[in-house]
Amino acid sequence: MEVVKLHRAPSPRPQNSITAATLLAWGAHDRLAPLQCAEAWCREIPGATLRVFDDSGHVPHIEEPDGVAAAVTEFCGGREGRR
């Protein structure tokens, strides 16, 4: 699977240079980008937060819109006043 190959790409990875607060909203049943990719990205992006949506595949924002909206609201609310 191509995504898994990208997951195993050698460093330096672009994820390492992300400095913004980052929320990874990932579907537990994503067959295009498996959860192991999300877990790797979460380790590689400094301070990243991973939120897994149990009833979603590749598009949790469409499959679980209320849950994703709540996660984004919570994530952003917890960062007020931070930069």
Image (cartoon, grey):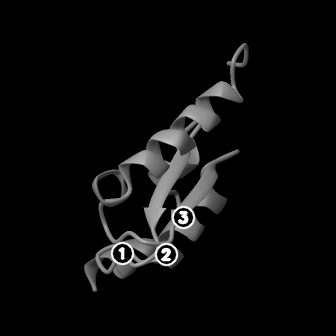
Find out whether the residues at labels 2 and 1 contact each other: C-beta distance under 8 Å. yes
* Residue pointed to by mark 1: 30
Find out whether the residues at labels 3 and 2 contact each other: C-beta distance under 8 Å. yes
Q: Quadrant of the C terminus?
A: top right
Where is residue 62 drawn, in percent x and y? Answer: 28, 54
Q: Is residue 26 visible?
A: yes
* Amino acid type shown at disc 2: Leu
Q: Is residue 20 visible?
A: no
Asked if residue 33 lies left or right of residue 46, the reply is left
Q: Secondary structure at mark 1?
A: loop
* Residue pointed to by mark 2: 35
> Nearer the observer, disc 3 or disc 2?
3
Viewer-nearest residue: 66 or 82: 66
* Residue at 32 percent of width and 81 percent of height: 31
* Amino acid type shown at disc 3: Val
Extreme bottom residue here?
1
Q: Secondary structure at mark 3?
A: strand
* Amino acid type shown at disc 1: Asp
* Residue pointed to by mark 3: 52
Reading the chain from its start, which is encountered first: label 3 or label 2? 2
Find out whether the residues at labels 3 and 1 contact each other: C-beta distance under 8 Å. no
Asked if residue 77 lies left or right of residue 26, the reply is right
* Residue at 60 percent of width and 29 percent of height: 76
